[in-house]
Amino acid sequence: MLKLLAEDAADLEIMAAAAQDALVRVRDVSYDSKARRFTALINRFRWETANAHAPYERIRTALSFESVLGVKSRNVRRDAPDALASMLSVTFAPAPEPPGGEVRITLAGGGEIALEVECLEALLLDVGPSWNTPRRPDHEA
């Protein structure tokens, strides 16, 4: 079981590597403006256990960001709750006045979610058992 915390861009790079190629459904992404929390339940590919041949593993994982001031999305079908996307990257661009900035979640197919954060506070936490999958993400194909 994986539990990662990120409080700066270097931490977020490690977290992003663990979350790369995770599958996420639109219905599993939410923003609570009152709590200032963005969450996504993802099906994370377990890169840390992957070897050259199947079976591979995925695991249900929570990705959350605290101190979120606002969320914008582009090319995300919020009217299609069962739409599935693959997470390509998670990056942080600091604001001119630290510690705030923008977290950008890039999805396959041109989708993006941008979070304006007061400061970087992120958590990636495996929350369920893993299961076998025959496919390994392949960026060359």
Image (tube, grey):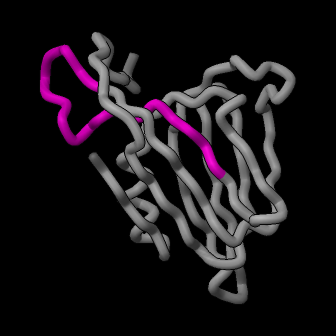
Residue 127 location, x and y as percent?
41, 42
Q: Nearer the viewer, residue 113 or 126?
A: 126
Residue in the image at 58% along x and 73% along y:
120
Residue 85 can be seen, yes or no: yes
| Residue located 50% across and 46% down the image | 62
Compared with 111, 9 (above or below) is below
| Residue 103 coordinates in the image, percent (x, y) | 64, 61
- In the picture, measured across the screen, residue 51 lies left or right of residue 122, that is left
Figure check: 118 above or below 60: below
> In the rendered picture of this protein, how many numbered marks are placed on residues?
0
Q: Is residue 136 above or below residue 73?
A: above
64 relative position to 1: left or right: right
**Residue 77, image quadrant:** top right
Q: Is-magenta flag for residue 118?
A: no
Magenta region: 39-57
Residue drawn at the location 13% of the way across and 28% of the way down: 51
Q: Where residue 61 appears, x then y in whole percent? A: 45, 41
Q: Judge by depth and name the residue closer to the eye, 101 or 39.
A: 39
Extreme residue in the top direction? 134
Q: Residue furthest left?
A: 52
Q: In the rendered image, which quarter contains the C terminus?
A: top left
Q: Residue at x 69, y 66 (%)?
A: 102
